[in-house]
Structure formats: C-alpha cells, structure tokens
Amino acid sequence: MTERYFDYAATTPIDDVVIQDMLAHMGRKTIFGNPASSSHSFGQRARVAVETARRQVAELVGTTADNLVWTSGATESNNLALKGVAAATKGRRHIVTSSLEHKAVLDTARQLELEGFDVTWLQPDGDGLIQPDAVAAALRDDTLLVSLMRVNNELGTLTDIAAIGERVRQRGALFHVDAAQATGKVKIDLSHLAVDLMSFSAHKTYGPKGIGALYVGERARPLVQAQIHGGGHEQGLRSGTLAPHQIVGMGSAFALANEVMDEENRRIAQLSVQMREGLLNLPGVQLNGCGTQRVPHTLNLRIDNPWFNVESLSRSLAFSSTSACNSASNAPSHVLLALGLDATQAYRSIRLSLGRYTTLEDVEVATDAIRQCLPQ
C-alpha cells in the first residue's frame, strides 16, 4: 500500500507552479546573475526578480516590501530577531517566551539566558494556549522582547497575537511572532497588528527549503543588529549573496497561497472534521490542545491504549509523534510535556497534519489504519 503523507507541518512539497518559476533562475540560459551586481543586465534582472518576490511575500502578510529581510529560513529569522534585538539593548534585560515554542526560539532564549538575560517561561493553560493576561502579568519595566508563535507547530493551536501585541506595546517592549506555521493558513495583516518582528519560512507554504524572511517593523528597525556580517546586504541586517531561485520560489509560493488560501482552508477544514469525527469516537483517543482555537490543518491525538502499535501505523502513514526537531533526538515532545502529559502519554501521541494534496481517500485510509492499530 502506498504510504499516505500526513506530515505537512514538518514540510510541504514544492508546488509545481513554484518549481517552474524557480527553474527560470537555474541554468546558463536563465536569469542567473548575482542580484548585487548592479553594473550589468544579468545582475539587474536578478535584482528585479528578488524585489518582485519580496513584494509577493509582503502582500500575503500585509506589509511593505522594504520591511522584509531575506534569511535562510524561520530558524535564522528567529535567531536574528532575538539575538539581534538583545545585542542592541542598552538596559532592558528581560525576555518573555513560552514553553510551547519551537526549538529555534527555545534554544536561542536559553543562549541569551547564558549571556545574562532574564527569561520568563510562560506555561500554557489547560487547552494548551498562552493567554494574553498571562503575558501581561509577566511584563516588567525592563522587558525587552516577547516572543510567541502564531500557530503551534505540534498542536495547531492559535495564539491571540492581536490582543497580546497591544499589551506588549503598552509596556514599551517589542513583540516577535514566529509565523512559520501560519502563512497560507490564517490571514496576517501586519499593518493592523502590534507586532514588531515576524518570522517566515517558505517550505511550510509549498515553497523550497533553505529560504525565509524576517519582518522588521518601524519600532524594531533601530534595535536590530546584524548577526551575519560581510557586505552589508539586506539593508545591513543580513549579509550574504542572495539566492534568486530560492527567493523567487518563496515569492511564488506566497503569491499562490494568497490566491488559494480561502478555498484551500475550507476544503482542509472539511477533511479535518471528518478525520476528527472518525478518530475521536475510537476508545482511548483524545485531542491534545484546544478544540476550537486552532487551525484545521493539524491534529495532535493522544491514544491512551498500552497496546497501540505506532510502528505498525508508520508503515502505512507518514506522520510525526512530535516535531522534527524533537524527532532528531528521539525525545518526547516538550510541547506535550508542557501540557501536563507524562513521557509515556507523549510517546503515545501522534501528529497528523493535512495539506494541499490531502484527499478524502487519504483521510479514510488514515482513519481505518489507526482503527486497525487499536485492539478491539
């Protein structure tokens, strides 16, 4: 039987439309020039492509192109946001984040702790949510930055960044949002959000791996210091030769997401409802995280049955029991542990994430496969 893909939260395949746009920048007879080479047409045409892609990304998230800095992905964007702001601080030494964040934020915050910053680690409520009031209570006069994700990569739960951003701004701190899992799934309008920094990744939105961007708003711009030096590219915030084929891929993917998001989300929501109804009626199967404040794309299920055979299931379904960063170390999910699950319960949880190419047949096959792995 063909293995069915349910790991879109880990990565998405590059859309065929995006591949074709990328190929126009790969090869001797394409637009292959260095965008920084402004003295000839090869470089000039590459620069035009880069700036077109920047506008495409900006249009999806409601900002202007000059607020976006190209990076190698959301991990680098998160590092630049946290470390870049921390490097410029003149007195504020307090950072607020949560125990639910991606390792790219968690490990960066821990590194800043080693460098003398005081970090407050917020804990989720019973639904796996970081509430605005909890953030407000953690803010201090010396709070420099708050960093939270918009869509949790393991649970699919949504953080109320609009309400949190207003509270953070009232106290004079900066607000960073990791939106790697959000683009194409929820509407983002940075022109109306009290958000100062936002991280993006192409490969979570049907674009190529190895390319991302960081939104740097007006309040944050004077306070971000480059972490990669050598040429002063990207307005001095991120040096290095730009890769037009990767950048064009991200722009194309975000432009496509802008076109299809509403229809795609309705279809995925219907599939998600069917999957939830089919699985949550099985004995011992429970949903991890809030059942309402979430995107439909990701379901994290705890299977409280000691005889549940995860290995058997993995022969027919491609899914995760945790995030890719935890899978690499074979550790139980830090997100599920933060929800109050013990290690055994975390190991018995599976993350099923749906996407652009998930079909009704895939959902039916997955539901049946899980049912067969549960002893009657």
Image (cartoon, rainbow, N blue to C red):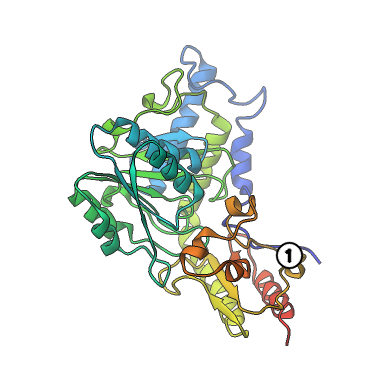
Q: Residue furthest top?
A: 39
Task: Name the foreground residue: 49 vs 112.
Answer: 112
Q: Residues within 10 Å of mark 1 (few under 14, many from 20)?
A: some
Q: Quadrant of residue 91?
A: top left
Image quadrant occupied by the C terminus: bottom right
Query: Where in the figure is residue 314, as x and y percent of width and height?
Result: 73, 65
Q: Residue at 49% across / 54% down in the picture?
A: 181
Give the answer, above or below, for where 375 lies relative to 58.
below
Give the answer, above or below, for where 154 lies relative to 64.
below
In this orientation, does residue 147 appear? yes
Give the answer, above or below, for where 357 lies relative to 20.
below
Query: Where in the figure is residue 323, as x and y percent of width and height?
Result: 57, 56
Task: Name the foreground residue: 4 vs 49.
Answer: 4
Image quadrant occupied by the N terminus: bottom right
Image mark count? 1
Give the side of residue 210 with respect to residue 29, left or right.
Answer: left
Q: Residue furthest bottom?
A: 376
Q: Amino acid at mark 1?
A: Ser
Query: Where in the figure is residue 296, as x and y percent of width and height?
Result: 50, 68
- Residue designated by label 1: 314
Q: Secondary structure at mark 1?
A: helix
In this orientation, does residue 251 appear? no
Task: Name the foreground residue: 316 vs 27.
Answer: 316
Q: Residue at 56% across / 60% down in the picture?
A: 333
Q: Quadrant of residue 207?
A: top right
